Amino acid sequence: MYGFHNRLLHVDLGTGRHRWEESGEDRLRSFVGGIGLGTSLLYDFAPPGVEPLAPENPLIFTSAPLAGTGLTTTAKYAVVTKSPLTGFIADSLSSSFFALELKAVGVDAVVVTGRAPAPCYLFIGNDGVEFRDASRLWGRSAADTEAAIRAELGNDAVRVAAVGTAGENRVRFATISNEGRHAGRGGVGAVMGSKNLKAVALSGSARVSVADPAGVAAAAAALRQRSLGEHTAKYREIGTVANLAVFDRLGALPTRNFQQPTFAGADGLSGESLTENSFSRRHGCASCTIRCERLFKSLSGNEQRMEYETLFALGPLCGIEDPEAVLEAARLCDAYGLDSISTGGTLAWAMECVERGLLPEAGNLRFGSAQAVLAAIPAIAERRGFGDLLAEGSRRAALALGHDSLDWAMQVKGLELPGYEPRSLKTMALGLAVSPRGACHNRSGAYEADFSGTVDRLSSEPGRGALVAASEDFAAALDSLIVCKFLRRCFEDFYGEAAGLLAKVTGWDYSAAELRLAAERIHTLKRCFNQREGWCPEDDGLPPRVLTETLATGVAQGTRLTHDELQGMIRDYYDARQWGQDGRVSEARLKALGLDRGA
């Protein structure tokens, strides 16, 4: 096959055995790769009702057809499992050389099940699969683990994805890290740690064959040129940290656990200020011409990667103005392997609990207390003291604490909200409410409608459902090919051009209509998986604070989002999806998408 290897590796850590299977052309054509392929495999390999941290829950690493072809921004891979944070699907992406090496070891996907009797790591190479002892690596950071494995194998070209202390301790929002990047949201690292799997190491030499080499080369050259144009200028010039000042001006910057939509310290913490005072260098993922990554240098001389979501979550959300403290908090999250959004969201919930006279064991963990945050992050990763409660995430922690604290746990389906204020971005509010992953800004671009000026972002007129559904399908296509979302506006006709790229790589006669259908099929199967795992209509919603409190500051002052408004938008979304009014996927839609046999 072109673009794929048609090989699936299934590893059972409990028995120490592995087997090879065909991926199947029908599956690959229907679900493409990346998130789509991972979703399909999760549905098939996860026993219905499996506990996320049970040995039987599969941890799935997937490649994509465009990876390794030289097309810009395509060096990405997906990790899919059942989330220990939400109980629903967790689908995370990460990037760079590990993604290229996954393709080079000659697989489309690796499905890991079971639990090793002692800490181990997998080494997958040209000669097969090795189960290697990782006892001496337990307790070490992902970066240290990567260096140690390379030294042990005597190969600096080995690529490694590993968990840190948080994953080992099954913190429910732990990440899997590779080369300083992270498959972050949903707790995929906790699943990996629960299997006593410290790392996956890869070294291969398989080459990607494409059906039309000249056509792929020409398309790659054209896409590289477009990637350096106006549509990516923000990412190339300042990076995503530019969003902080913009969102503050729009009254859309969640502050102090979503109690305010603006932050008094926004100027000093803005991307512009960081760039002027702390900028160290610009970097990028493998196979990327945009190079959006920004590294900032702290007073101690350490370099730290920073993007908007981490900056928001560890800064304004926790009321922290000091850039040095935010950089250090981000460093700690990376070192321990913690999702920075869920870390900030859970800490902000705890801060509000302390200020309401609850959670006395958290001591001086209050809004604006940088030192308390820096002390709390290791406590979470190590499940030490009150950190053990916070390691469960804000929803579980609130349910355990009681006293109505769930009212200010800012999460959807258990996943903490990203840095978008739903009351002043109402298309985004709907996107957050209905996302299969929970409160997610990456599995749809619903916020783009709010920022585009094509809708009134402060109102909720009919039509938002179709906008959100279209943005979810668009994201599903990007995440399955895989193409970085920062390239999304460089396409004039995305589905037509992307289908053309897929055809040049695979040799398939693949059309824009087929890619659109595949994107909807992928998103719908996520919904089917969640339904199978216990989803109910009440899971599509937003935290009580969002639906009861009016914005009190900024240009959106006086704006609110009512329960009835949100429910109206959700019904509009179900109609756009042609699902039932209870939000369940209709039989007619399953049949139209070819899912009636497998979902």
Image (cartoon, rainbow, N blue to C red):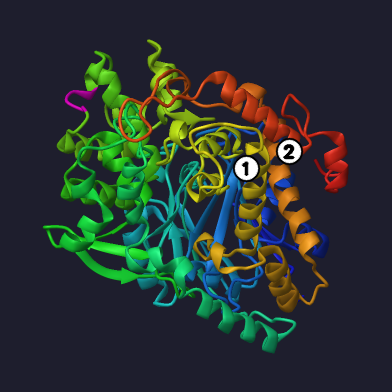
Residue at image point 40% right, 45% down: 339
Q: Position of residue 530 (x, y in %)?
A: 67, 34
Start-end of magenta stretch: 362-366
Q: Position of residue 581 (x, y in %)?
A: 75, 25
Image quadrant assignment for residue 322: top left
Residue at image point 78% right, 29% down: 580
Is residue 586 highlighted in magenta? no
Q: Position of residue 408 (x, y in %)?
A: 39, 21
Label 2 Cα crowd, 10 Å radius (few <14 / some 14-19 / many 20+) = some
- At label 1, which amino acid type do we have? Val
Would residue 454 be found to the left or right of residue 238 on screen? right
Residue at image point 45% right, 17% down: 548
Q: Is residue 30 visible?
A: yes
Q: Which mark, residue 576?
A: 2
363 is higher (above) or lower (below) than 142: above
Residue under label 1, please give it. Answer: 468
Q: Position of residue 383 (x, y in %)?
A: 33, 33
Q: Give the distance between the C-alpha atoms of the residues marked 1 and 2, in whole angstroms.
A: 9 Å
